[in-house]
Image: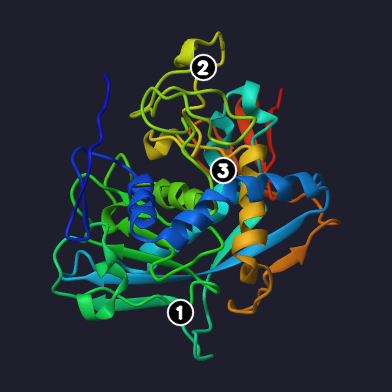
Amino acid sequence: MKKILTILFAGGALFLNAQERCGTTAITEKMMSENPEYANARSKVNQQTEKWIENHPNHSEKIIITIPVVVHVLYSNNNQNISDAQILSQIDVLNEDFRRTNIDAINTPSVWQSIAADSEIEFCMATTDPNGQPTDGINRVQTTHGAFGMNSDVHSTPAGGADDWPNDDYLNIWVCNIETGLLGYATPPSNWTGDGDGLVIGYQYFGRIGTVQPPYNKGRTATHEIGHWLNLDHVWGGGWGSCGDDNVSDTPTQEQENYSCPGYPHNPNSCSTTNPEGDMFMNYMDYTNDACMNLFTNGQKTRMLAAINQYRPNMLNHNLCTGTVAVSETQNQKRKLIKIVDVLGRTTTNQPTNSTLFYIYNDGSVDKKIIVE
């Protein structure tokens, strides 16, 4: 079924005239229409990124980049004032997804297992605020504002939101009551960075415990939006039916977004191609249910690393999280077992015979083993 998204501008506000899971494309177009300097900077991003990748062809050393996070919780009632535990559950999801230690990595079809990436990007709650004072990285703000849309209110204290922490130094995430039909949105990078840089996500879609609502209850909205914040496009590229290029060479050509949880292979003739693998609908940059997402590709990893190095370089050198530095060398790190899970994803310490078990390691690899009696 063809899906039409109409974007309307009125008095500086933006409205989505259809249900749209992610508002990043719309907010980017709005910002470009209102700010010629930003539009000019964004127009150069793909060329700059291609040049950076060309000049950095090898990523053989294992370098972990740690991004400090501040979460602004905007609430008008107790339900919206999500718990610390819910916030921390989202950080866990991000670290699992970006390091490919997520349990559902085993669900990636075998044809794409070899290009599924450990992005070597981690996230930590900031422990030092912009004034050098201790913090838990959570900024709670009670507000009388109704549902937030895609305007500047959410990142403005006088308008009922919360001001950014310096967005060169922190990943700002606003968790709030968001308008119906929208899960979240992000600001893609460029050499121009203004107020409001970061992510905005509905409180029902942040983390994997507490107030989260299925089918977006496993924290993948934030994974998806951080992908945009690090310069990833949707896997289908442009608008519906455009067969647009997502600027990543190892993702299949895809005609449109996917919803729910398709069976593999899906759309093997997408964009009039003969592609037996079909759409990579389990990629974090599609629109499928949280439970069906499980990978970034090597090409997407390279593009995200290019974004950090070019447009978010302060993330490479900081001490804003206790016990961490921004970049750590782990070239000689030994492979360590993290957990053993059964076919239902349950952690187990037993190793019964004649049963399939999955051994998950700290380097993102997964071994499938059957102990035969």
For the residue marked with disc 1, what is the amino acid? Asp
The C terminus lies in quadrant? top right
Compute the Cα span from label 3 to label 2.
34 Å
- Residue position for label 1: 136
x then y, percent, for residue 351? 64, 36
Residue 99: percent from left, percent from top? 62, 50
Q: Nearer the viewer, residue 243 or 43?
A: 43
Question: Sequence-wise, which precedes: disc 1 or disc 3?
Answer: 1
User: Residue 253: x, y in percent?
Assistant: 53, 23
Height in image: 317 above or below 44?
below
Does the CB distance between marks 3 and 2 fall below 8 Å? Answer: no
* Mark 1 vs mark 2: in front: 2
Whether residues under marks 1 and 2 lie with C-beta atoms below 8 angstroms apart, the answer is no
Q: Position of residue 174 (x, y in %)?
A: 35, 66
Residue of label 2:
278
Where is mark 3, residue-wise?
A: 348
